[in-house]
Image (spheres, helix red, strand yellow):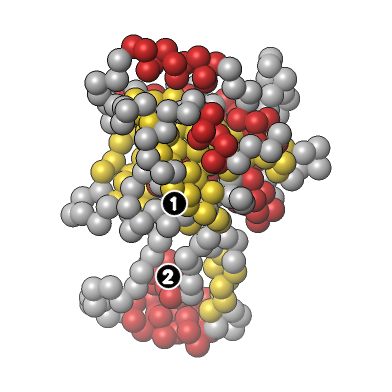
Amino acid sequence: MGDAITRAVGFGGMVRVYTGVTTQLVDQAQRIHDTWPTATAAFGRVLTGAALMAAMGDPEDRLTLQVVGDGPVGRILAVADGTGHVKGYVDEPHVDLDLNVRGKLDVGRAVGKGQICVIRDAGLREPYRGVVELVSGEIGEDLANYFLVSEQTPSAVGVGVRVAPDGHVLAAGGFIIQVLPGADDKIISALEAIINSLPDVSAWIAQGADSRRMLEVLLGGEIDSEPEDLPVALACDCNKERLLGALISLGPDELHNLAAEGKDAELVCHFCRTTYYFTPGELSDLAKQAQKPAQQPGSFKQDVE
């Protein structure tokens, strides 16, 4: 099985588990954004976390996970939906720090201190938005703290990325375990013993574990529902029309000036690095539209993530 999220309920309905392998997804993101090792690890953990969290909702739901710290990578943003599509970007991809005291990529120092923000859009009038302080910058601990503080759900979260010496991704993935109200101490003790016996997530995946095997181990055989598998992949929904809003926001004067240069204007998508070109004629037309007193609702769409 390739990249996928697997989910199931166990321990008499008292525990929800989501496991995922995202190796291909994170490796593709590394190549597109040309991330260096420490940035790759941080970016990959956020992409994986977003994919796991989006799998908790319905197919039409959309989740945005944003990590903003004062470390050298700056902002990391990932957007995922319930169909398994994930996209994202990191402000500063060219970050590679010395290993930390454990001999691991120093994601905590790369991210630094700051906040983690989660936006869940289920198509309701107002999306749910939760913001909490980062506790370590290591992403897994920060997500566990987010669930406890913002959603009042005790959770264990593990996310990891193993990067090869040449920079490509060898293994990536993670898990989320959530204990529901009413779970007794025996269940919690059993889960703690299982988690403490595990290798690092990226090592586990590098050894050949897929999302199904991870789920079976984490639930210790106490599976109550048939596991569901959701393929996940890097996917961007950008197109030229979506970027019109960004251009028209420049105003008619700036658009006229760009058109007068006689060259194509270039806009690059943050998420997939695709370049879109706008001819001088298109820029002139946009300038005329920008001079109108009001736009029709929905005339221009802009991805604001």
In the rendered image, residue 90, in percent from the top left (x then y), is placed at 56, 45
Q: Residue at x 55, y 55 (%)?
A: 233
| Residue indicated by mark 1 | 80
**Does residue 225 appear to the left or right of 221 in the view shown?**
left
Q: Amino acid at mark 1?
A: Ala
Q: Name the foreground residue: 2 vs 129.
A: 2
85 over 252 or under it: above or below: above
In the rendered image, residue 238, in percent from the top left (x then y), is placed at 48, 67
- Which numbered tag is attached to residue 219? none
Furthest toward the left, the residue is 125
Q: Name the foreground residue: 212 vs 67.
A: 212
Q: Name the foreground residue: 2 vs 174.
A: 2
275 over 115 or under it: above or below: below
Q: Amino acid at mark 2?
A: Arg
In the rendered image, residue 298, in percent from the top left (x then y), is placed at 28, 73
Quick one: SS at disc 2? Answer: helix
Q: Residue at x 29, y 20 (%)?
A: 183
Q: Nearer the viewer, mark 2 or mark 1?
A: 1
The answer to whether residue 281 shows anywhere in this view is yes
